[in-house]
Image: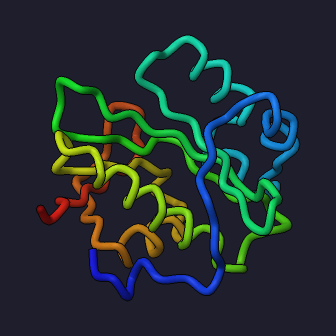
């Protein structure tokens, strides 16, 4: 990942999910043509409650929740997987997605046991493909659910 690829004019923070932001995360919506690209935030939060390895994060800009993401980085593995990521339809096109990817990659890179990050997305999601490629993710092929897997080797 080059530093320039991760830069954004839009400052964002990643915050743990809790009582203070759960309702805002649930209120986030995708555009109708994007809804098939990612599980709902309600499904993701339910999954996070059941999965000790899930790391859910609110994407916050200017004090507002503008998106949601979730990843896992098991202690017994050198690979982290970003498996949920969305920016609210009203907040798209403002640089929040790029800034959030940069932030989550920074957060994951601080985990000393992680040397590789994978992300999955629907093959027809060209915006996601371009975004992840701009950070250096390289497509690896389709998984068993016919989602594209792309990987990024972290420089140490």
Query: x and y percent of residue 14 in the render?
Result: 59, 53
The location of residue 89, given as percent across then percent down, is 80, 62
Figure check: 45 above or below 62: above
Residue 99 lies, with reference to residue 76, above or below; the image says below
Identified at 73% across, 48% down, the residue is 35
Using residue 123 as the reference point, say whether residue 113 is left or right of it. left
- Residue 18 vs 68, above or below: the answer is above
The image quarter containing residue 95 is: bottom right
| Quarter the C terminus occupies | bottom left
* Residue occupying the far top of the picture: 50
- List x then y, in percent, for residue 98: 54, 72
The residue at the point 87 percent across, 35 percent down is 23
- Which part of the image, by quadrant, shows the N terminus? bottom left
Residue at 63% across / 46% down in the picture?
15
104 relative to 69 in the view: left or right: left
Figure check: 61 above or below 40: below
Q: Nearer the viewer, residue 101 or 134?
A: 101
For the view shown, which residue lies furthest in the left direction?
156
- Closer to the camera in the image, 29 or 129: 29
* Res 84 quadrant in image: top right
């Amino acid at each position: 990942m080059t530093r320039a690829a991760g830069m954004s004019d839009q400052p964002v923070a990643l915050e743990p999910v809790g009582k203070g932001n759960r309702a805002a995360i649930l209120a986030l919506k995708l555009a109708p043509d994007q809804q098939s690209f990612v599980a709902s935030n309600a499904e993701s939060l339910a999954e996070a409650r059941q999965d000790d390895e899930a790391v859910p994060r609110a994407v916050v800009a200017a004090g507002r929740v503008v998106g949601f993401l979730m990843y896992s980085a098991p202690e017994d593995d050198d690979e982290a997987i970003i498996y949920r990521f969305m920016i609210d339809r009203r907040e798209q096109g403002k640089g929040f997605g790029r800034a959030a990817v940069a932030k989550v990659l920074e957060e994951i890179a601080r985990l000393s046991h992680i040397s590789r990050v994978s992300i999955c997305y629907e093959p027809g999601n060209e915006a996601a493909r371009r975004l992840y490629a701009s950070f250096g993710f390289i497509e690896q092929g389709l998984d068993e659910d016919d989602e594209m897997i792309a990987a990024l080797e972290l420089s140490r």
